Image: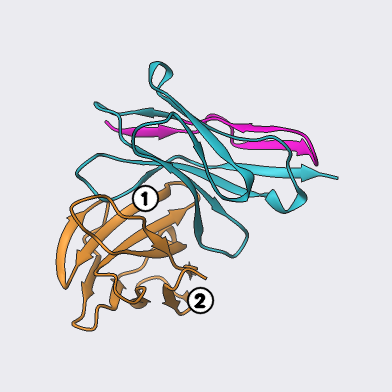
Amino acid sequence: AQSVTQPDIHITVSEGASLELRCNYSYGATPYLFWYVQSPGQGLQLLLKYFSGDTLVQGIKGFEAEFKRSQSSFNLRKPSVHWSDAAEYFCAAVDTGRRALTFGSGTRLQVQP
Amino acid sequence: DSGVTQTPKHLITATGQRVTLRCSPRSGDLSVYWYQQSLDQGLQFLIQYYNGEERAKGNILERFSAQQFPDLHSELNLSSLELGDSALYFCASSVESNNYNEQFFGPGTRLTVL
């Protein structure tokens, strides 16, 4: 079955430190890949997406993600975390030709001062 | 602000009851998606409507139904509610074309079943 896995339920980093959130997918063919952020009481906001081409994609708020086909991964990174980045982050995928998103279980990011 | 609106923001009801959640898509978007976010199931796709027609179905229970009206707003109807239906219900909308289009999410309706 198609699935998206986020191995880390909860991550704590210090403000100013770098961040990497892991995401692995299991699909027959490479799906479209996304990272969303959910702040408390808010809906989901798209950070970045990968359809094809350059495997390093830039998103909003200083985030980037790298697609690695050999590892079936799409990890999210940020060089320097800000306190306002504390939120829950979801990796998602959709089969090409389909529309509904399949989400990972999410990673909650806590930022220490 | 994504441009997608959902009402109500919060809903508290009892087991066995029926509720209706409403979603207004962004102006110009023809597709509406419903997702459920619960503690045990995570975020999962329920159903998609496109221009008034059901387009795709996910893990939607038979007790749940949806529709999309001519003005493109959508309603999700949940009946015979159980404790396990307590969740955050999101609506998302997209333009929809032959290519994949970004889905814009509303703020959600938090349903609590007591």
Residue beneath disc 2: B9
Q: Chain of mark 1?
A: B
- Same chain assignment for discs 2 and 1: yes
Q: Nearer the viewer, residue B65 or A94?
A: A94
Residue beneath disc 1: B44
Q: Secondary structure at mark 2?
A: loop
Q: Which range of residues does the magenta coloring cover? A: A1-23
| Residue B15 visible in this rendered orientation of the protein | yes
Rendered location of residue A7, percent (x, y)? 53, 29
* Among the two numbered marks 2 and 1 on one chain, the one whose residue lies closer to the N terminus: 2
Residue B104 — which label? Answer: none
Whole-angstrom CA distance, mark 2 to mark 1, is: 19 Å
Q: In the orientation shown, which residue stands out farthest toward the right? A: A113
Residue B88 vertical position relative to residue A16 in the rendered view, above or below = below
Let me know if residue A17 is in the magenta part.
Answer: yes
User: What residue appears at the point 35 percent right and 33 percent down from the top-left corner?
Assistant: A3
Residue type, numbered disc 1: Gln
Q: In the orientation shown, which residue stands out farthest toward the bottom? A: B71
Residue B110 vertical position relative to residue A11 in the rendered view, above or below = below
Q: Is residue A45 left or right of residue A31?
A: right
- Chain A colour is cyan
Residue type, numbered disc 2: Lys
Residue B59 vertical position relative to residue A43 in the rendered view, above or below = above
Rendered location of residue B105, percent (x, y)? 43, 63
- Chain B colour is orange
Q: Nearer the viewer, residue B30 or B73?
A: B30
Rendered location of residue B32, percent (x, y)? 28, 66
